[in-house]
Amino acid sequence: MENKGSCSLEKSSCYGAIIAVSQVGRCAGWPASMVGLMFRSCIFVMINYFVQSAFIYYIYDSQTNMNPFGGQMHLCDFAAHSASEDGGSVALNLLGNLAFPLLLVGGLFLLSRRNGGAGGMGGPGGMGGPGNPMAFGKSKAKFQMEPNTGVTFDDVAGVDEAKADFEEVVEFLKRPERFTAVGAKIPKGVLLVGPPGTGKTLLAKAIAGEAGVPFFSISGSEFVEMFVGVGASRVRDLFKKAKENAPCIIFVDEIDAVGRSRGAGVGGGNDEREQTLNQLLTEMDGFEGNTGIIVVAATNRADVLDPALLRPGRFDRQVSVDVPDVKGRLEILNVHAKNKKVNSEISLAEVAKRCPGFSGADLANLMNEAAILTGRRNKDSISAAEIDDSIDRIVAGMEGTKLTDGKSKSLVAYHEVGHAICGTLTPGHDPVQKVTVVPRGQAKGLTWFTPGEDPTLISKQQIFARIVGALGGRAAEVVVFGDDEVTTGASGDLQQVSNMAKQMVTTYGMSDIGPWSLQDQGAQSQDMIMRMMSRNNTSEKLLEQIDGAVKKISDEAYEVALKQIADNREAMDKIVEILCEKETMSGDEFRSILGEYTAIPEENLEAARATVTI
């Protein structure tokens, strides 16, 4: 059965729906690929409908071309609708088939217009709009025409050299004629390099607050996507916007996420990250150039960056942002103490001397933890106790449950006093700051030493003294309790001893083998792939000599520790008795008691006087 009128109605309805889909897609500003996808979906629905409306059933024998049940082959035409079917029911049937594509088209259209009115391709609600599903190729950089970060150079302390470099860049942006008159050009890029927490991102915020020019900020990881070409597209879009707003500043945080050396990845030279890096190199200093755009980037992994990215013309300056010295720490503490109530008896200069090696983030956390403890203890202002407890918490962890077992407490006390005695009596060792049997973190007790101001320049005598001090705990257990009663408490100390002794031999050349570096540079790299690819070029004979030299240093240090503990057993017993009662003893009190029984090296006493106990 057949209904030609209804068939023509179906065709005209389908054609109209297809044209409607195409017009909606063009009005919404969708790309040709999206419109084509919707067009093909409607064609598929139309074909599917007509195939279902009339089908042919053949009964056919491939050998005889006859019906296997007898007779000639029959051609049967079955209609999916009756002769009484009118045009209205056909239209409803067609609408049911087109419901899903139309809902999909309508949903995408509303989604593309959600964030704005009738914006076009570049409008707030068009294809470039932040809520559009097809905008994943656009840059995600945060843009501020007049940045208001609330941070200025006055809020940045402890990094005077880096701040001076950026003040010069800001001055160039504000008064360029002062520099161009003598032929100077503005730096194209500045790379901030330093350990975590030293204030690299804070410096970028200060630049945004001081420069008075448009500011783009983005993380290096935001360029990386699973879709091919998206990262490079975002780089192009970012620099396109920057050129439209030049002069301006682009800040890329953690640039090592996208700027790693090419050819070192698993995907060879054609992976998505390397294509993104190639586009970044071209935009920073390619054929067209980027006059008026200053790229500021931050990383703590400058060793893994691509050499083409580090060359002048892309990053003209590399600014090192290191941990602050005692003067810088004092300036940082003054900044973070402005909005806190600190007891007038507390000297921030003394606190700064207590925290060598602390970064700006550590010092900010220190003052915040002290304020939290002050509120918890219902005090009106931060006192020395809160400062001291905050330093302990940052370095060693939270305070644990105090020891109640007398034997365990005595063993821990002897162990910690052994560290303190060996460290104090060995020339060149850092002074004892305090000894405690209060558990913190994984440690049952702790002996705090105050390191020198410059931890990067250490003598052979100092390293050997630290090995002796680390072995003092095990030596005290052996002398006091015997070989059979030694515990696992010295496991961390022994690991430190092995590392320091091996570095003396293989890295610093401080052994009888000679002044050679015996470790492959690739094995020292922080990159896992470089460590895996490194080869051991050391012969077996030399490896035996290295093991012998490491053992010799450790044995000599252990003999010194055993002798110091045995010779000062009376002083140790006295100190342990007081420590078990008070649970915490200051370095000055410890040296005072020990000085009654034996002579302390003068250089160690001078180092102790240079440090201050709050």
Image: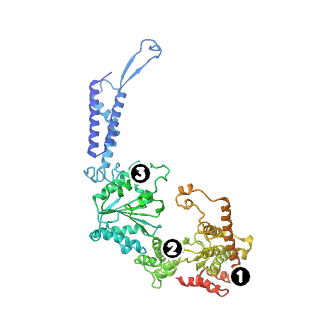
The percent position of residue 284, horizontal first and vertical second, equals 36, 58
Q: Residue at x 46, y 54 (%)?
A: 262
Front residue of this view, candidates 289 and 83: 289
The percent position of residue 153, horizontal first and vertical second, equals 36, 73
C-alpha separation, residue under disc 3 versus residue under disc 1: 68 Å
Front residue of this view, candidates 588 and 611: 611
Which residue is tagged 1? 567
C-alpha separation, residue under disc 3 versus residue under disc 2: 39 Å
Which residue is tagged 3? 275
In this view, the mark in front (3 or 1): 3
Kind of residue sitting beneath label 1: Asp
Kind of residue sitting beneath label 3: Gln
In this view, the mark in front (3 or 2): 3
Which residue is tagged 2? 357
Earlier-in-chain disc, 3 versus 1:
3
Kind of residue sitting beneath label 2: Gly
